[in-house]
Amino acid sequence: MSTTSGNRIDIKKFIDERPISPYQWLLVVLCFLIVTADGMDVAIMGFVAPSIIHDWGISRPEFGLVMSAAPIGLVIGALFAGPASDRIGRKWVLITSVFLFGVFTIATAFTQSPFSMAALRLLSGVGLGAAMPNSTTLLSEYAPQRKRALLITVMFTGFNLGSALIGFAAGWLIPVHGWRSVLIFGGALPLVLIPFQIWLLPESARLLAVRGAPAQRIGKVLGRVCGVRFAGNEVFVSNEPPLPTRKPIGVLFSQGYGSMTIALWVTYFMGLLVIYLLTGWLPTLMKDAGLSVTTAANVTAMFQIGGTIGAVLVGWIMDKARPAPVISAAYIGGAVCVLGLGYIGAMSSSLALLVFAAGFCMSGAQTGLNAFAPGRYPTVARATGVSWMLGMGRFGSIFGSAIGGALLGFGWQFGAILAMLAIPATLAAIAILVSQRVGSTETAAQPNTAH
């Protein structure tokens, strides 16, 4: 470890100017594993649902209560976790969230009725909704600016990996041990992570500085993460714009942040609406158009593959250029792709390529937005800003899933539904540019002040 003499240290500038330490890479891995566990538990019910419906002898509408419980919990968890994290700290809120969705997922394996299963999935969802924004916020506060978007988007690829892993696990476990074993497996892995989180996860040094923690404590945390030995007489600061309120939720709607907050919500809502309607209903639309179930499933999987690659590439470009226009261009690309899908129809030989491209653009933009949002808020409200954006955006996923069924009920066909998705994708592209303009314009006049 190197040694630094006593001086006034701006934590963000200090992190930005140093090479990435081994401990920072370890933090990326830890957050990646948390997001992977999150992805497993979000996707788990889709893989066990057919077996549960068969074993319990219930209808699909009856099981719909169980399927809708976790998304509601995700919204609740996101809305409550952010303010808690900004008050209590990132580390313990994140550890608690992982503990909650691990324990309640295991408990779900022992339920005997749809109602009790729905209640436990609701509680699991609360933990799931809290984990993602806190992982994003903590990593963003220790990632140097020059690599921040890339590191966060790489972290988010763990979500797709987790969703795929639990699918493979379900295919292996259900025939041998039944569907309950999948839930036990899916809940046990997050719990395995907790001792490592307690041992290795740091608290946010920037939050500690804003909250007035002793310099010795800040130096110990920051030195451990960055591989530095401080002399012990440093003054640690986090240069932030002056705020009219110290309450995290109040900051979101204060002068300089209110319009930007709404614009970010609109962007995230519209993006998730497109993604969830497309991934949730595309197999059904293709089957109705005459494709086999196997082909429909394989083509839909191309969306996830494209999304994983797109997330990493968009994150890399965001670190090289202005991030908001990059994200906006990706959303526009998504709009063009879904328009193209509607035009060529389900029987085209280019279907898989366009679905891949749609996933590349839409998921790339959506993941890029997760990397963009933390930097738009001050430390005292950063977790609240990110988690409330994710929470409000979840309504887009719920609406997207519901509207797909409604449009099919009205007799809409493959081409019409997909072409319609170009509208929310375009609105997302516009809203992200608005979020940058109103945020940078309103905060530009505010001088930076050390806190």
Image (spheres, grey):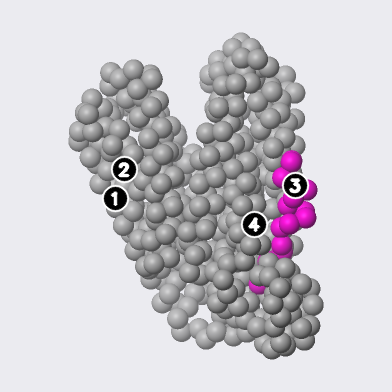
Kind of residue at badge 3: Ile
| Label 1 with label 2: CB-CB less than 8 Å | yes
| In the rendered image, the vertical position of residue 63 relative to residue 301, given as above or below | above
What residue sits right under mark 2 in the picture? 357
Numbered mark located on residue 194 in the image? 3
Kind of residue at badge 4: Leu
- Picture quarter containing residue 109? top right
Q: Which numbered mark, 1 or 2, is in the foreground of this view?
A: 2
> Which region shows up in magenta?
191-207
Q: Earlier in the sequence, mark 2 or mark 3?
A: 3
| In the rendered image, the vertical position of residue 350 relative to residue 50, given as above or below | below
What residue sits right under mark 4 in the picture? 26
Instruction: Give me the C-alpha separation between circle 4 and circle 1.
Output: 34 Å
Task: Give the quadrant of the N terminus.
Answer: bottom right
Label 3 element class? helix
Numbered mark located on residue 35 in the image? none
Left or right, 178 with respect to 295, comes to: right
| In the rendered image, the vertical position of residue 301 relative to residue 241, given as above or below | above
Q: Nearer the viewer, residue 353 or 95?
A: 353
Label 1 element class? helix
| Image coordinates for residue 110, horizontal then vertical, percent | 75, 23
| Label 4 with label 2: CB-CB less than 8 Å | no
Q: Earlier in the sequence, mark 1 or mark 2?
A: 1
Left or right, 181 with respect to 325, comes to: right
- Picture quarter containing residue 451? bottom right
